[in-house]
Image (cartoon, coloured by chain):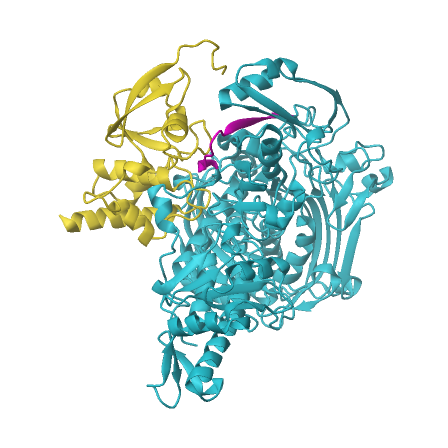
């Protein structure tokens, strides 16, 4: 895990939340670390740093990734969306965020950004899921407060609200 | 009583920041010139540091400095050191290194040479109790709260006397009793004698306990992750060797604690000491693996309970003996709570309790959600089922006949003290009806191929309230009510729920209320933390007395300005209104302005004598800004406040794989008046999720030959995920007021874990025809062994089993 003395530092471009950011990265820098410590996007949380908990989940393109286990070099020029980039079309709270509030999803809140990102990505692919489909889709996001039921309520509410808005 | 706010849902002010990622936890703060620290952790379970050579590391580019035990106050065993030259567990921090980035700090650790002399160690408490057995620390093997460090050994005869698979019962370190235990056992129709083991396990808070600190203009700024703001403050200041007015402590959000971040803990002091030494802000990120070492853990038990039942199922005698794996420090009093929990949940007519807290070279152990009570629930409830089977009684009936009601007592310590109120019988009845126990129990043992249905009931208890803390609030000239709370923010939202009690007293519209919290500069009163299921009782009282004080001042100001006496006025719609003429009134905003002009007690310039110095300081800091309501909770408190829960589970267990699905689960809470229904439901269901983990997968394993923990990752301890628990769980609350809480509220955070853990343990046992595992957790291979009639791979008292 040595940083590699004399390793070449590189200036790369990252497209985060619709903005292109130039950032100096080491070859072994993870996306989570760069987001948090080089781009100031601390909404992405590091719960385990080894792809076990899902607290660091971000979207790369349309897919969710554990940013703690994604080398930043591999996502140059990809569209990265963190929790800070999750918004409704009018710039307010995204329906998932509002539904998580309404259903009292977060307890301690540390896993919440990851839950939000996974839920948003899931509903994009499956706007009218069953509760069981949502449960399976969310299975990579741990919540030690055990708020799974409240988060699922939130996802189902968000799906319903989005459908009724259309 | 009809309430405007209590019993109704609301949106807590801090929740939006959680869904947008704006909530700042301790690792999210930055300071100019901040550097990163990494810890050198002991690779041995017990050793002495002989030499540290950091010269190569200090020569590295980017390395700023090293902090060793010699740079911080010495704390002798069994205290909890900040850094140590005598590590007593694998993972004990020996030194810290700081560098411009974390990777450099990690590289620097590789260059530091630490010479260690290994010392004897122990991971199994019984091994330490053998004559000549190893001691976890040099001067002894037994210590706990109220138990001085001592060497305590049993004789070879003590061990020989115990029957096969039974806990030996040498001399205890502590014991108590009430009633005539000998007569109790004589009265019994049946007596069960059960030896059981409960494993240690981690809290698994999603946020590791990272901390950042710096010094500025003579003050130390600490960003920490903790369950209590005020309660941490004096202990942190003391640990840092500074005066309270030299500390600024920021703890607005806590990413889970479950007891492991109850108040000050030693690694919180490292960034502050390091920052002082190198004159740079220091961030100490704790990794998940480190969290397993130094992040506290639930204590393990090796215990034996003899329990006598009359023909109707009434518990007439209990004789409990518990050995606690305590870790290398004073740890927590889980083992004492085994006794008190049994005394409350089963209300035995007579009882003796004995215990030995044994030091072990395992991670320091601390309170974890229902410390002691919940291990006890998970182990005891299947024993109650065994008695029901032998006596031919219904499993609900045997619980009901023993469950505490308002005549119930708490027997911990040997003195039977009344409970402030108790409705466990009501909880059982409500649960049995909603779960349809009468029909569900008929499904018990129903087979479909290799799958079999099991049903179970669980129960659990924790104390649920304290008293004597202070409340502080202000009404400002803009009419807004600012409620100051130092209780902390664990994510239960009870900091806000109990603040609503003050708003209720004053008749405030909740939109006009602001809660001041999470930062010592905001003027926080002396409050207990968010632990021990206490908030909904303790903080209800402090907020109530502060609001009553403010109400009295409002009435007095109105009488002064508008004539008459305070009794002639009432509060309505944020106005003080004359009872006789509604046109005679003044707004709270006007009264607040008058309070500032009047000064003295009205604006907080004069304070009650009996306030805690922290509250006095905080109230003085905000004095003159409005009408100040401030008081110590001197309300009547007699007896022990209980939180009680009943759980009902139905599972489908596969006898070929040892896996099971939880088909249905219901919790019923007895927590007094419900403050915040959705918040209560979230606590009950969330605790149940944790309880299922406790019964099924979560446990530590240490290599007994090397003392090295084998479980240092989430995949090894397997906390429950979305797909391990039912996607829909149910909950109910008895919702009967506690007479010693101003609006009837009591806490509840911990017992719903125990009721779920025990209901699941009972359901597993039920699916296997009443098989007794006498061990928590119950792993899949244990289930397969039991289902196929094979012997288990562990011995009854063995610890560290897979």
In this view, the residue farthest toward the left is: A166
Residue B187 appears in view = yes
Looking at the rendered image, the quarter that the C terminus of chain B falls into is top right
Q: Residue at x 58, y 60 (%)?
A: B615
Write down the quadrant of residue B130 in the picture.
top right
Closer-to-camera residue (B2/B278):
B278
Give x and y (percent) for residue B413. 73, 59
Check the rendered structure and report the hue given to chain A: yellow
Q: Residue at x 60, y 40 (%)?
A: B297
| Numbered disc total | 0
In the image, taking residue B497 as reference, residue B398 lies left or right, namely right
- Up the image or down, B189 lies above or below A9; here it is below
Q: Which chain is cyan?
A: B
Write down the quadrant of residue B801 in the picture.
top right
- Up the image or down, B14 lies above or below B406; here it is above
Q: Residue at x 35, y 14 (%)?
A: A10
- Up the image or down, B752 lies above or below B397; here it is above
Give x and y (percent) for residue B553. 49, 76
Does B40 lie within the magenta span?
Answer: yes
- Which contiguous range is marked in magenta? B27-41
In this view, the residue farthest toward the top is: A6
In the image, taking residue B408 as reference, residue B569 lies left or right, namely left
Write down the quadrant of residue A33 in the picture.
top left
């Amino acid at each position: 895990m040595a940083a590699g003395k004399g390793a070449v530092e590189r200036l790369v471009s990252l497209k985060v939340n619709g903005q292109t950011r130039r950032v100096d990265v080491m070859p072994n820098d993870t996306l989570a670390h760069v987001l948090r410590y080089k781009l100031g996007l601390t909404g992405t949380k590091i719960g385990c740093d080894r792809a076990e908990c899902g607290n660091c989940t971000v979207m790369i393109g349309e897919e969710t990734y554990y940013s703690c286990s994604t080398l930043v070099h591999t996502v140059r020029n990809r569209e990265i969306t963190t929790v800070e980039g999750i918004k409704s079309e009018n710039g307010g709270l995204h329906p998932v965020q509002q539904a998580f509030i309404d259903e009292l999803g977060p307890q301690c809140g540390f896993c919440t950004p990851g839950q939000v990102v996974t839920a948003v990505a899931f509903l994009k692919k499956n706007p009218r899921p069953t509760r069981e489909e949502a449960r399976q889709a969310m299975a990579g996001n741990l919540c030690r407060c055990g708020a799974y039921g409240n988060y699922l309520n939130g996802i189902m509410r968000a799906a319903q609200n989005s459908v009724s808005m259309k | 009583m009809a309430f405007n706010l209590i019993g109704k849902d609301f949106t807590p002010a801090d929740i939006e920041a959680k869904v947008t990622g704006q909530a700042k936890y301790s690792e999210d703060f930055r300071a100019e010139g901040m550097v990163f620290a990494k810890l050198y952790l002991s690779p041995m379970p017990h050793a002495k540091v002989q030499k540290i050579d950091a010269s190569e590391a200090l020569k590295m580019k980017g390395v700023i400095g090293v902090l060793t035990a010699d740079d911080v106050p010495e704390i002798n065993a069994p205290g909890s050191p900040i850094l140590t030259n005598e590590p007593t567990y694998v993972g004990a921090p020996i030194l810290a290194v700081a560098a411009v980035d974390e990777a450099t700090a990690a590289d620097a650790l590789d260059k530091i040479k630490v010479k260690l002399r290994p010392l004897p160690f122990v991971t199994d408490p019984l091994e330490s109790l053998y004559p000549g057995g190893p001691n976890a620390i040099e001067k002894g093997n037994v210590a706990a709260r109220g138990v001085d460090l001592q060497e305590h050994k049993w004789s070879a005869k003590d061990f020989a006397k115990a029957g096969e698979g039974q806990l030996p019962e040498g001399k205890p370190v502590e014991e108590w009793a009430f009633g005539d235990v000998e007569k109790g056992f004589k009265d019994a129709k049946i007596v069960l004698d059960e030896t059981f083991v409960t494993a240690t396990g981690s809290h698994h808070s999603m946020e590791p306990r990272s901390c950042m600190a710096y010094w500025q203009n003579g003050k130390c700024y600490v960003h920490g992750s903790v369950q209590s703001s005020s309660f941490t403050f004096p202990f942190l200041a003391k640990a840092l060797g500074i005066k309270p007015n030299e500390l600024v402590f920021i703890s607005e959000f806590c990413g889970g604690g479950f007891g492991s971040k109850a108040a000050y803990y030693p690694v919180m002091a490292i960034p502050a000491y390091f920052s002082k030494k190198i004159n740079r802000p220091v961030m100490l990120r704790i990794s998940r693996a480190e969290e397993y070492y130094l992040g506290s853990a639930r204590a393990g038990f090796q215990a034996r309970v003899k329990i006598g039942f009359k023909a109707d199922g009434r518990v007439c005698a209990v004789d409990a003996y518990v050995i606690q794996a305590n870790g290398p420090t004073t740890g927590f009093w889980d083992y004492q709570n085994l006794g008190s929990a049994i005394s409350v949940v089963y209300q035995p007519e007579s009882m003796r309790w004995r215990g030995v807290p044994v030091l072990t070279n395992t991670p320091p152990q601390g309170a974890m959600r229902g410390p002691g009570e919940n291990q006890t629930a998970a182990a005891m409830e299947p024993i109650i089922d065994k008695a029901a089977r032998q006596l031919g009684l219904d499993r609900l009936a045997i619980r009901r006949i023993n469950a505490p009601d308002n005549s119930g007592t708490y027997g911990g310590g040997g003195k039977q003290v009344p409970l402030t109120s108790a409705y466990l019988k009501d909880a059982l009845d409500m649960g049995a009806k909603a779960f349809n126990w009468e029909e569900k129990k008929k499904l018990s043992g129903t087979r479909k191929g290799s799958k079999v249905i099991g049903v179970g009931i669980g129960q659990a208890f924790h104390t649920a309230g304290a008293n004597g803390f202070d409340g502080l609030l202000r009404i400002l000239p803009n009419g807004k009510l600012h409620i100051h709370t130092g209780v902390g923010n664990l994510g239960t939202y009870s900091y806000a729920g109990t603040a609503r009690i003050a708003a209720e007293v004053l008749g405030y519209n909740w939109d006009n209320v602001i809660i001041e919290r999470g930062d010592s500069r905001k003027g926080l009163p002396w409050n207990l933390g968010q632990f021990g299921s206490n908030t909904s009782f303790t903080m209800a009282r402090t907020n109530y007395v502060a609001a009553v004080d403010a109400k009295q001042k409002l009435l007095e100001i109105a009488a002064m300005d508008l004539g008459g006496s305070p009794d002639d006025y009432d509060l309505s719609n944020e106005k003080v209104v004359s009872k006789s003429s509604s046109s005679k009134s003044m707004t709270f905003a006007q009264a607040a302005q008058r309070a500032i002009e009047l000064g003295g007690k009205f604006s907080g310039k004069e304070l009650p004598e009996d306030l805690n110095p922290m509250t006095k300081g905080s109230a003085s800091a905000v004095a003159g800004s409005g009408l100040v309501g401030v008081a110590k909770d001197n309300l009547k408190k007699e007896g022990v406040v209980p939180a009680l829960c009943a759980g009902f589970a139905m599972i489908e267990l596969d006898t070929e794989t040892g896996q099971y699905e939880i088909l249905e689960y219901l919790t019923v809470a007895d927590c007094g008046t419900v403050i915040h229904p959705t918040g209560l439901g979230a606590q009950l269901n969330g605790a149940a999720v944790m309880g299922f983990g406790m019964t099924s997968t979560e446990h530590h394993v240490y290599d007994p030959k090397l003392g090295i923990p084998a479980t240092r990752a989430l995949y090894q301890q397997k906390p429950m995920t979305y797909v391990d628990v039912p996607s829909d769980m149910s909950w109910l609350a008895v919702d009967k007021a506690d007479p010693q809480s101003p609006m009837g509220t009591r806490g509840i955070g911990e017992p719903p874990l125990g009721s779920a853990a025990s209901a699941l343990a009972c359901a597993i046992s039920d699916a296997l025809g009443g098989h007794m595992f006498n061990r928590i957790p119950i792993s899949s291979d244990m289930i397969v062994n039991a289902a196929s009639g094979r012997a288990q791979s562990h011995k009854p008292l063995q610890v560290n089993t897979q």
